[in-house]
Image (tube, rainbow, N blue to C red):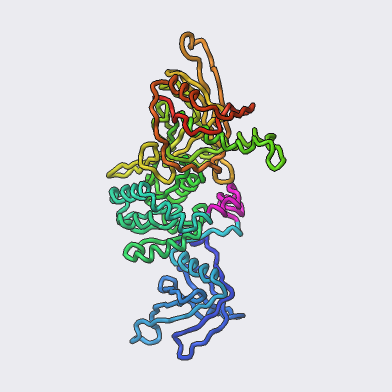
């Protein structure tokens, strides 16, 4: 029975090439067209036709062809064939030089050759896809401009280097793969969003039978070069340029490997692509590296950070800026700065309660479950202090058959390129030790490959009669995960205080400094240089 995979493929044509038969005694160059197609038996072939001729000049079996790059606009096609006319001539080589008009045509032909030879089909968006649309699932939910910027960013080596030099990240992946080589040895592996191809090479090091490295950005070409530079591993790796939502593979994968985590685990929405890869290509009971992710959250107190953000808006308090009064925009600017989540590393002693955890199981979660994530919050403050917002970090699990490894971005752990994330309230909230803090952390995805964050924190009644009391104060904020404030500083020195009262006295003892007051925010000192970092825990 014919494999249904082959039935999906339509011929692929390169109409304007030049052809030189170098095996002939008098090689000459002529215009031609090249066709990739399947014969009735499902065998992939490369046929060359001269203009106005239905009979191919060459009809080559792709399984017997090798392609070599001669230059930016030329490829060398070498095929080993059996001699049917002369019984003493067991085999011979046919050499054809193929010329192109542009570098893009050369790259496209080379990619088509690899995909047809391996039985890989890249679904074109100029025809209906699996969902009946002319757009892929990715294109339907992601803004085209956002996608273009995203793939441009990850198509640059400097950004790949930034991730490779995160030795916590890269070292944990390498250890998780090599220590669990039993999961990879002799298995088919799919690397989802392969980037530089480093995880594919790790999988090959662990003994994978074959690795399909799927990468949609221009980094795919660099990955090919890196893999070709490691031939003992590269012979078992195939790089496929395309989106997971649009490519097809010649076989199912026994294991998926990927680094789909963004800031707060979910930013960039690549987890959805990871889940789609699972549904499309992973065998039943196949493994996923990583298999599970957890978002950790806890309220924090950080006077330094709050004053730093609030003071950014003081520019708009000027009443005579070259003769212009800017103060009408102060309130909007103040709120604007507090709509940015803060990405940095902080001292874990700034946390005022034990964290809570929200788990995402990549092995069974549905793609649609990632469109909107709603997390109820409930904490008990360990100290009386001002709460400035909610701190978040994540970790992921590599659930190997031999060793389980966690990759964590927690405060106090070795810093990663993800750092941690904090949502800062425009109006701090005062709580007492033992007081309950409730709320909601609501993430809603948008087409710029990120999320809008809706945070609500409430302090419940505290002390005698609290059971009969309700909520004393509630504060909310809306933030865009796509537009964070990359503070990227090391944790501030932690200053111990005897109690909250001494903290207040210290602030009051400073030299008077100009204050600003607005209906949208509290009084804020312009010069915070001597303000204590936090109260005692």
Q: Eyeballing the image, is 19 above or below 436?
A: below
- Please, which residue is most extreme toward the front here? 511
The mark total stands at 0
Q: Eyeballing the image, is 346 above or below 147?
A: above
Q: Eyeballing the image, is 371 above or below 161?
A: above
Q: Is residue 286 visible?
A: no
> Residue 14: x, y in percent?
56, 72
Quadrant including the C terminus: top left
First to last magenta residue range: 128-150
> Residue 490: x, y in percent?
42, 41
> Residue 60: x, y in percent?
46, 75
Image quadrant in which you'd find residue 89: bottom left
Q: Is residue 163 magenta?
A: no
* Nearer to us in this view, 12 or 143: 143
* Nearer to us in this view, 319 or 440: 319
Quadrant including the N terminus: bottom left
Q: Is residue 429 visible?
A: yes
- Please, which residue is most extreme toward the top here? 465
- Please, which residue is most extreme toward the right here? 323
Q: Is residue 147 magenta?
A: yes
Q: Residue at x 58, y 42 (%)?
A: 446
* Nearer to us in this view, 450 or 64: 450
């Amino acid at each position: 029975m014919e494999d249904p995979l082959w039935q999906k493929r339509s011929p692929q044509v390169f109409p304007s090439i030049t052809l030189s038969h170098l095996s002939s005694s008098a090689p000459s160059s002529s215009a031609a067209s090249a066709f990739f197609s399947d014969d009735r038996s499902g065998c992939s072939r490369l046929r060359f036709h001269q203009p106005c001729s239905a009979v191919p000049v060459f009809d080559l079996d792709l399984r017997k062809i090798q392609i070599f790059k001669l230059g930016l606009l030329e490829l060398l096609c070498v095929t080993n064939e059996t001699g049917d006319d002369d019984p003493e001539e067991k085999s011979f080589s046919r050499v054809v030089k193929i010329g192109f008009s542009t570098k893009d045509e050369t790259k496209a032909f080379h990619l088509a050759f690899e995909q047809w030879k391996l039985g890989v089909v890249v679904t074109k968006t100029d025809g209906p896809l699996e969902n009946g649309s002319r757009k892929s699932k990715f294109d339907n939910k992601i803004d085209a401009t956002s996608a273009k910027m995203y793939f441009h960013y990850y198509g640059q080596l400097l950004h790949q280097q930034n991730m490779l030099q995160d030795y916590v990240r890269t070292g944990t992946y390498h250890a998780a793969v090599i220590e669990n080589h039993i999961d990879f040895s002799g298995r088919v592996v799919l690397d989802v969003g392969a980037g530089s191809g480093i995880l594919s090479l790790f999988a090959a090091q662990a003994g994978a039978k074959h690795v399909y490295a799927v990468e949609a950005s221009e980094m795919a070409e660099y990955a090919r070069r890196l893999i070709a530079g490691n031939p003992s591993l590269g012979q078992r790796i195939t790089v496929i340029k395309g989106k997971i939502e649009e490519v097809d593979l010649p076989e199912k994968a026994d294991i998926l490997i990927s680094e789909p985590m963004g800031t707060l685990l979910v930013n960039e929405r690549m987890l959805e692509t990871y889940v789609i890869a699972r549904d499309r290509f992973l065998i039943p009971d196949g493994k996923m590296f990583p298999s599970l992710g957890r978002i950790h959250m806890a309220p924090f107190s950080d006077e330094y950070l709050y004053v730093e953000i609030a003071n950014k808006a003081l520019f708009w308090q000027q009443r005579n800026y070259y003769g212009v009064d800017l103060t009408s925009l102060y309130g909007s600017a103040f709120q604007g700065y507090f709509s940015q989540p803060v990405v940095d590393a902080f001292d874990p002693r700034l946390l005022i309660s034990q964290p809570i955890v929200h788990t995402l199981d990549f092995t069974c979660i549905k793609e649609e479950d990632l469109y909107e994530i709603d997390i109820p919050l409930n904490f008990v403050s360990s100290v009386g202090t001002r709460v400035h917002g909610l701190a978040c970090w994540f970790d992921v699990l590599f659930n190997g058959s031999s060793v389980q490894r966690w990759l964590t971005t927690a405060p106090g752990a070795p810093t990663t390129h993800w750092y941690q994330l904090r949502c800062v309230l425009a109006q701090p909230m005062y709580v007492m030790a033992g007081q309950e803090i409730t709320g909601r952390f609501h993430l809603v995805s948008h087409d710029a490959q990120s999320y809008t964050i809706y945070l609500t924190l409430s302090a419940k009644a505290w002390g005698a009669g609290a059971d009969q009391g309700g909520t004393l104060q509630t504060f909310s904020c809306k933030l865009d995960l796509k537009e964070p404030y990359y503070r990227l500083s090391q944790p501030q020195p932690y200053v111990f205080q005897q109690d909250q009262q001494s903290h207040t006295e210290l602030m009051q003892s400073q030299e008077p400094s100009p204050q600003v007051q607005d209906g949208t925010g509290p009084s804020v000192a312009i010069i915070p240089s001597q303000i204590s970092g936090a109260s005692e825990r």
